[in-house]
């Protein structure tokens, strides 16, 4: 009887250790990090542009996903891949000008890289910069 109790206890302890290890230690799923100690990327395919900037600033998408950029600002924006002005790192993010109220999808994500983007029409505005982590 004591041996069965020990075996059940050891099995339960091993299962709990596996759960804690795979969930990041506090029982919650581990989120991907943005590498800079800031807010982790959000898993979505939508980026909203407002007068305050882009939201979310950092996203995660699967290979093949398209990102829908929505311009909820009252002025034109032009999401473009880094670096400025060449826009060559991730050309699928070069979607052209978005007038107020417009939205447009990017080309499909290639996968396996992280792409920075900015507003070509206001390239020095840090609030209009973001990253897309392509899995």
Image (tube, rainbow, N blue to C red):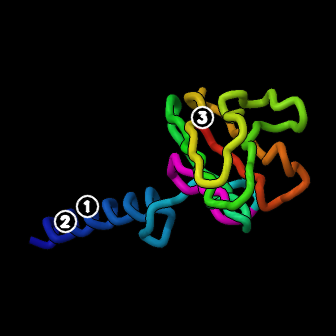
Residue 128 drawn above or below residue 80: below
Give the CA separation, mark 1 to mark 3. 49 Å
Location of residue 110 (image quadrant): top right
Q: Residue shown at 26%/65% (left/top)?
A: 12
Dot 3 or dot 2, earlier in sequence:
2
User: Helix, strand, or loop for circle 1?
Assistant: helix
**In contact (CB < 8 Å): disc 3 and disc 2:** no
Location of residue 48 (image quadrant): bottom right
Please identify the quadrant where the N terminus is shown.
bottom left
User: Helix, strand, or loop for circle 2?
Assistant: helix
Answer left or right for 3 relative to 97. left
Q: Which residue is mark 1?
A: 11
Q: Which residue is mark 2?
A: 8
Give the CA separation, mark 2 to mark 1. 5 Å
Residue 13 drawn above or below residue 59: below
Which residue range is magenta in the image?
A: 37-49
**In contact (CB < 8 Å): disc 2 and disc 1:** yes
Q: Residue shown at 67%/48% (left/top)?
A: 99
Location of residue 112 (image quadrant): top right
Question: Which is closer to the viewer, label 1 or label 3?
Answer: 3
Q: Nearer the viewer, residue 69 or 98?
A: 98
Residue 91 is situated, as x and y percent measured from the top left of the image, at 72, 27
User: Helix, strand, or loop for circle 3?
Assistant: loop
Asked whether 134 falls inside the magenta stretch, the response is no
As drawn, the label of residue 74 is none
Answer left or right for 81 relative to 20. right
Number of numbered tags placed on the structure image: 3
Dot 1 or dot 3, earlier in sequence:
1
Q: Residue shown at 59%/54% (left/top)?
A: 101
**In contact (CB < 8 Å): disc 1 and disc 3:** no
Q: Which residue is mark 3?
A: 106
């Amino acid at each position: 009887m004591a041996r069965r109790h020990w075996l059940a206890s050891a099995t339960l302890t091993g299962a709990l250790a596996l759960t804690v290890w795979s969930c990041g230690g506090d029982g919650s799923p581990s989120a991907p990090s943005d590498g800079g100690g800031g807010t982790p990327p959000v898993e979505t395919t939508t980026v909203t542009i407002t007068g305050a900037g882009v939201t979310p600033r950092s996203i995660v998408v699967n290979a093949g996903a398209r990102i829908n950029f929505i311009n909820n600002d009252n002025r034109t924006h032009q999401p473009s891949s880094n670096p400025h002005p060449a826009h060559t790192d991730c050309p699928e993010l070069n979607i052209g000008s978005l007038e107020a109220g417009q939205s447009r999808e990017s080309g499909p994500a290639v996968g396996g890289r992280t792409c920075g983007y900015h507003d070509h029409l206001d390239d020095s505005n840090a609030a209009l910069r973001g990253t897309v982590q392509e899995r």
